[in-house]
Structures are given as structure tokens and as C-alpha cells.
Amino acid sequence: MKQLLLTSLIIVLLTACQRSSPSEPAAVASAPAASSDSDVIRVEFLPTTDNEYTVMKAAGASHAMIFTINHFMRSGGIELWMEHYVDGQLHDSVNRFTSYVADNVANNKIYFSIQRISDEEQRWTFAVRQGDNLASAQANVLISNQTAMVSTPLNDVEMTGGDATALGTIVVSEEDTPLSASTDIEATIRQNKEVYVLKCKASEDNAGV
């Protein structure tokens, strides 16, 4: 119950933060186009200095990544999931969450956060915001409290409809060994025993939603 309240608090506080923040981005339609190709969608990492991170951490998030969705020229679905790699090989996937995004709504964002719910378990939340509406899904992941973790987002990503694109990584280690993390996704997977890759895919109107 406590964790559900924390998650609800994050959503409520983020909504209030969006309404009151004077530095809120303009409508998506006014964002600079990433390409002349209308199928290209630009996803940009929101700097950690933004007060949304402060709100999420105050509500219990130990790790968070926030991305703005720009140049979304067509309504459609945004799918989020985590690919789990062990010893350089794809092991499994964590959650597959799809939300609908309209092309004429301002303030489209992607959220990923981690909350500790016990010494051996974490709650990972995937969310998509459009305007004041936020849809989310959660997955419980068995990761010890003694595990070291480092998250690395990609700053600026372009993707086209139907193509899966990496937005960032989470490297975990239960050993006393240095973690190697960078924006080079393939190198990060090769150089670490266990890596999670946050993936995103956009679909055309009504596809998969």
C-alpha cells in the first residue's frame, strides 16, 4: 500500500509541477523538426537539473530518466520495455507497455523510475505523459539492495515508426568490480555482466494500442 501511495504521489506531484513550472516547453508542434521526413520522431533526455527529478526523488524514486517527445507528427502508440542482457547475451525482457500519443498535444514525455520496495526487490515504473494525462505500468524486479547500479541515458535520439530504439542503459553488479557505462550501448553490454537497455518504439495511428 505504501508503494502504491508513493507512485500515486509521483503522478500527482508531476502534474502539479507541470502546471506551475514557468520553464515548461512549448507545444510539440512548435519544436524544431529533427528531419524533413515526417516519420522521424525526436526523443531528448531532460537534464537532471529539471525540478521534475526533485519531485520524483522526493516521492521515493532512487533512479529516474525523463525524455521529451518532439516532432511527433502522427498520432500513434509509444511502446516501452527493458531488454535484459547477461554476459553479453539477451536474457529476457522486462515489461512491455504501450500508450497512445496524439500529435496535437503539448508536453509529451517518457518517464522511467525505480523505487526500492524491499531489500531484494525493486519496482520499475514506465510512463508516458501527454498534456495532463499520464499512463503508466509497473514491473517488480528482483535486485538486491547490495547491488550497485548506474543509469546512463542517451541525450538525443531519432527514430522512425516501427523501429526499436535504445533510450538508455542501467548497469548492475553484485560484485566489487567497477561498472563500465557509456552512451555506446553495444560496448556497455559487452563490458558488463548484467545490463538493462530501455527500448522505445513508435507505431502509426492505432497500431498496437
Image (spheres, rainbow, N blue to C red):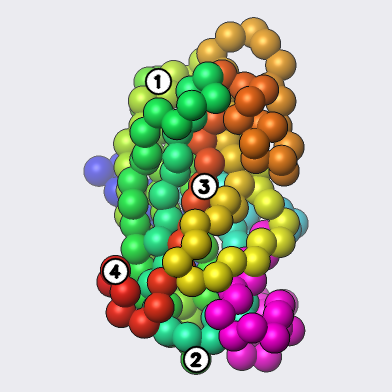
Disc 4: which residue: 208
Disc 3: which residue: 198
Do residues under tags 4 and 1 come within 8 Å of each other at their CB atoms?
no
Between marks 2 and 1 in the image, the one whose residue lies nearer the viewer: 2
Which residue is most to the top? Answer: 176
Give amino acid for label 2: Asn
Label 3 residue SS = strand
> Image quadrant of residue 32?
bottom right
Between marks 3 and 4 in the image, the one whose residue lies nearer the viewer: 4
Label 4 residue SS = loop
Horizontal and vertical percent for residue 61? 51, 44
Disc 1: which residue: 119
Do residues under tags 1 and 3 come within 8 Å of each other at their CB atoms?
no
Label 1 residue SS = loop
User: From mark 4 to mark 1, how far is it between C-alphas?
Assistant: 36 Å
> Image quadrant of residue 36?
bottom right
Disc 2: which residue: 104
Give amino acid for label 3: Leu
Label 2 residue SS = loop
Left or right: residue 97 versus residue 64 is left
In the rendered structure, which disc, 2 or 3, sits on the residue that comes first in sequence?
Answer: 2
- 62 falls in the magenta region: no
Left or right: residue 52 versus residue 205 is right
Horizontal and vertical percent for residue 181? 70, 32
Give amino acid for label 4: Gly
